[in-house]
Image: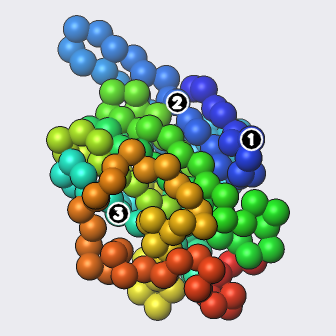
Amino acid sequence: MKVWQDKELGGVIIIEPDKFEDHRGHFLEVYQYERYREAGIEATFLQDNLSFSRKGVLRGLHYQYPHQQAKLVFVAEGEIFDVAVDIRRNSPTFGKWTSVILSGKSMRQIFIPEGFAHGFCVLSDTATVIYKCSAYYAPGSEGGVLWSDPDLGIEWPIDAPILSEKDAGLPRLKDILPERLPQ
């Protein structure tokens, strides 16, 4: 297993699990508690989610507060451009973002700690995205940031994404009340 800590955004970790391939296909451990703890992932995961999307779909940028979630995100099939944005209002990296290409071929993963918004866009014809969450979905804690917020300057590899009505109407980060953002 290879592990990279994001140099800009503390707590964001990229993982590349060991993948064993032969004439039958491949095998890998998607998650193993002790190894991931040794890699710096202290979260206890309580819920797994699966998202299937078509090319050009953009989901996000989503977060929960006050019932925050850390996420471990990977792609079972297809390819996505995945983004994490620091929305902790007292953080020195508030409003900064990082991205990674995740695919079913590489099986690379991203760990996104609490206090970050998360989103992705689909680059392949379709993509199946699975993510482990450290807290249950809490509708009253749901929040989001507009994917195209010019203050964030995310360099999405797509100009006209397919969005849900909800995601299209999300606010810019500067317009979210401070009490609706993690510290």
Counting residues from the start of the chain, the first of labels 2 and 1 encountered is 1
Identify the residue at image location x=67%, y=58%.
Answer: 96
The answer to whether 167 is drawn above or below residue 95 in the figure is below
The answer to whether 13 is drawn above or below residue 118 in the figure is above
Q: Nearer the viewer, residue 65 or 172?
A: 172
| Callout 3 crowding tier (Cα within 10 Å): few <14, some 14–19, many ≥20 | many
- What label sits on residue 174 in the rendered view? none
- What label sits on residue 59 in the rendered view? 3
In front of the other: label 2 or label 3? 3
User: Image quadrant of residue 29?
Assistant: top left
Amino acid at dot 2: Glu
Q: Which residue is mark 2?
A: 16
Q: Secondary structure at mark 3?
A: strand
Amino acid at dot 3: Arg
Amino acid at dot 1: Lys
| Callout 1 crowding tier (Cα within 10 Å): few <14, some 14–19, many ≥20 | few
Q: Is residue 29 visible?
A: yes
The answer to whether 27 is drawn above or below residue 58 in the figure is above
- Quadrant (top left, top right, bottom left, bottom right) of the N terminus: top right
Identify the residue at image location x=32%, y=34%.
Answer: 104
Counting residues from the start of the chain, the first of labels 1 and 3 encountered is 1
User: Image quadrant of residue 175?
Assistant: bottom right
Identify the residue at image location x=34%, y=49%.
Answer: 158
Q: Nearer the viewer, residue 181 or 29?
A: 181
Give x and y (percent) for residue 64. Answer: 53, 77
